């Protein structure tokens, strides 16, 4: 296997990722620019993970059908650069992918040269240029600044290295090569630390919040992992200063008034990033479009992700869509910091999201382990909102409970677009979603959970009582009268109490228990419901606060 081997690349990348992962939440908590959404560490880790996963694939399969044992450095670094691009998410992830691309282009341009301090310094310089070029209006005091300072550090060091250490000959062993590279990179880490410490002087929002730049800190942690990887198994990480979270929460949200951090890949031919930039900027901010004529990575903060994707209709195929709700991320980050926790939570293999309307319904879903998407009064979230909910769940796989027949198509489309494995369980009402959710097991696989919840849906009969929105054409009831539904059919009408009694009676014929969920404006309080229930029917009662429906009913 040629030098540098896949195994050596993998050791270094794995160590870099491990260094970042160990302090990922620390990086997240520093994140106040451009939006205080607390995901910089997550986004950088996802990019590094994509590179490591690609290395694993190359180690097994090779590149472009070639033998894995004969992969050259040029092919390898180009493949890893593409993997970083495809896996990037958010500002920090996309910029990191361009750092990887810039370094890869320099390494690929010098086939046959041993990777030595001179080549590494050139690669860092190329990477810094690529990162700056990817941002339309680069701000100083960010990860761009920190990486540029580390690149300058390497260039300055060359003047103080002896000729035999600047350029390594073929007689240098792998161990010697790694030791020399580790030495110069450790000095770059020290300069990077100083650059991170200066970021509050360069960017007002950092100074006002009492933090350093999150992305810059993340880059130093990554480079510390690279040094440990070069030094071999068991080598300690170079010490990197622990950075405290904000003393004062001052989200930079006035500069990004948009809700969704939207990322996707466009594949085609003759793609031109400059042609779409103005149109994307008209839809939002924090626009980054990077790649080449065959593949573009698009990042934008916007309220209309679908409109951003539609700009590429006829130009290429949109895939790997990743949408995050930044307002939710900001709220979660602020709550975590206010509670003084480190953010570490137990995350199952499978997560679940449920569409809900009503504060009580949201609470009931959350108590059963679901992340909740606010469906609003009409219980009709967009595909983007569902997709943001999927990607906001920390689990590797996600079930979606749409809670309405009107949401099923949007939920299915979101699952198709999601990078994360996701599947819809076709619950057509909130009460059906709630009762199915009782069977959810976060430790089980996605398909196993889907089968369990779908089986539970088959054992549930649903109905409800609502005030009539208009007079009945058949003359059965007037506007404002109570109307009872069972399995989608009108079964009772008239007074609230008698309609509720008749509807429960219809649903409870073959049931052991009936769940009653009280809604907003229900004319009979839940504590008085028992007087309007058939004899022998066991009730389970909850306050849901849902609009439109006085009572939601489910029988098992």
Image (cartoon, rainbow, N blue to C red):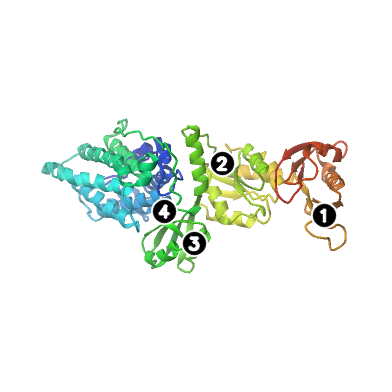
- Looking at the image, is mark 3 or mark 4 earlier in the sequence? 4
* SS for dot 2: strand
Instruction: Assess disc 2: are there few (<14), some (14-19) or many (≥20) residues with their C-alpha within 10 Å of its C-alpha.
Output: many
Q: Which residue in the protein does label 2 denote? A: 350
Q: Which residue in the protein does label 3 denote? A: 309
- Looking at the image, is mark 1 or mark 3 earlier in the sequence? 3
Mark 2 and mark 4 in contact (Cβ < 8 Å)? no
* SS for dot 4: helix
| Residue 202 screen position, x and y as percent | 31, 46
- Looking at the image, is mark 2 or mark 1 earlier in the sequence? 2
**Could you say which is closer to the camera, residue 130 or residue 512?**
130
Q: Which residue in the protein does label 4 denote? A: 86
Residue occupying the far left of the picture: 163
Q: Marks 3/2: CA distance?
A: 28 Å
Q: Marks 1/3: CA distance?
A: 41 Å
**Could you say which is closer to the camera, residue 466 or residue 226?**
466
Q: Is residue 171 above or below residue 100?
A: above
Side of 32 where 551 appears, left or right: right
- Looking at the image, is mark 4 or mark 1 earlier in the sequence? 4
Q: Marks 3/4: CA distance?
A: 16 Å
Label 4 vs label 1, nearer the camera: 1
Quadrant of the rendering where the C terminus is positioned: top right
Q: Give the number of the disc on residue 490.
A: 1
């Amino acid at each position: 296997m040629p030098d540098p081997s896949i195994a050596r690349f993998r050791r270094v990348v794995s160590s870099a990722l491990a260094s970042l992962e160990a302090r990922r939440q620390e990086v997240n908590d520093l994140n106040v620019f451009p939006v205080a959404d607390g995901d910089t560490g997550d986004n950088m880790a996802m990019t590094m993970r994509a590179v490591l996963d690609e290395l694993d694939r190359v180690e097994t399969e090779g590149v472009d059908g070639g033998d894995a044992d004969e992969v050259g450095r040029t092919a390898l670094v180009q493949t890893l650069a593409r993997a970083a691009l495809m896996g990037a998410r958010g500002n920090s992830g996309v910029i990191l992918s361009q750092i990887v691309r810039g370094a890869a282009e320099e390494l690929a341009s010098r086939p046959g040269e041993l990777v030595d301090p001179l080549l590494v310094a050139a690669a860092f310089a190329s990477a810094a240029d690529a990162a700056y070029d990817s941002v339309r209006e680069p701000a100083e005091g960010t990860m761009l600044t920190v990486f540029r300072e580390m690149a300058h550090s390497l260039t300055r060091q060359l003047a103080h290295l002896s000729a035999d250490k600047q350029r390594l000959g073929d007689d240098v062993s792998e161990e010697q090569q790694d030791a020399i590279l580790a030495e110069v990179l450790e000095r770059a880490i020290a300069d990077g630390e100083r650059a991170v410490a200066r970021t509050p002087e360069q960017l007002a929002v950092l100074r006002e919040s009492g933090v350093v730049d999150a992305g810059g800190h993340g880059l130093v942690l990554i480079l510390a992992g690279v040094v440990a990887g070069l030094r071999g198994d068991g080598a300690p990480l170079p010490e990197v200063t622990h950075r405290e979270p904000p003393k004062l929460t001052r989200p930079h949200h006035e500069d990004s008034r948009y809700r969704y951090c939207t990322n996707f890949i466009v594949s085609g031919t003759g793609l031109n990033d400059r042609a779409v930039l103005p149109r994307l900027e008209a839809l939002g901010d924090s626009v980054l479009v990077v790649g080449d004529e065959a593949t573009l990575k698009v990042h934008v903060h916007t309220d209309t992700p679908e409109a951003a994707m539609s700009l590429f209709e006829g130009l290429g195929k949109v895939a790997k869509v990743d949408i995050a709700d930044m307002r939710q991320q900001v709220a979660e980050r602020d709550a975590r910091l206010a509670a003084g926790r480190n953010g570490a939570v137990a995350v199952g293999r499978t997560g679940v999201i449920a569409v809900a309307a009503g504060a009580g319904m949201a609470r009931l879903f959350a108590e059963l382990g679901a992340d909740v998407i606010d469906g609003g009064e009409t219980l009709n979230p967009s595909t983007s909102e569902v997709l943001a909910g999927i990607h906001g769940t920390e689990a590797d796989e996600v079930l979606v409970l749409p809670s309405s027949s009107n949401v099923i198509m949007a939920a299915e489309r979101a699952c198709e677009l999601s990078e994360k494995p996701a599947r819809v369980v076709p619950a057509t009402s909130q009460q059906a979603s709630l009762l199915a959710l009782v069977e959810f097991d976060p430790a089980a696989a996605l398909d196993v959970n889907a089968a369990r919840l779908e089986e539970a849906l088959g054992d549930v009969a649903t109905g409800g009582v609502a005030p009539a929105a208009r007079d009945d054409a058949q003359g059965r009831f007037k506007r404002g009268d109570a109307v009872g539904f069972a399995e989608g059919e009108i079964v009772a009408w008239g007074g609230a109490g008698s309609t509720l009694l008749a509807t429960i009676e219809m649903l409870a014929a073959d049931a052991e228990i009936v769940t009653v969920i009280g809604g907003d404006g229900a004319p009979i309080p839940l504590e008085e419901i028992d007087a309007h229930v058939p004899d022998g029917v066991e009730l389970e009662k909850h306050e849901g606060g849902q609009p439109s429906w006085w009572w939601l009913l489910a029988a098992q």
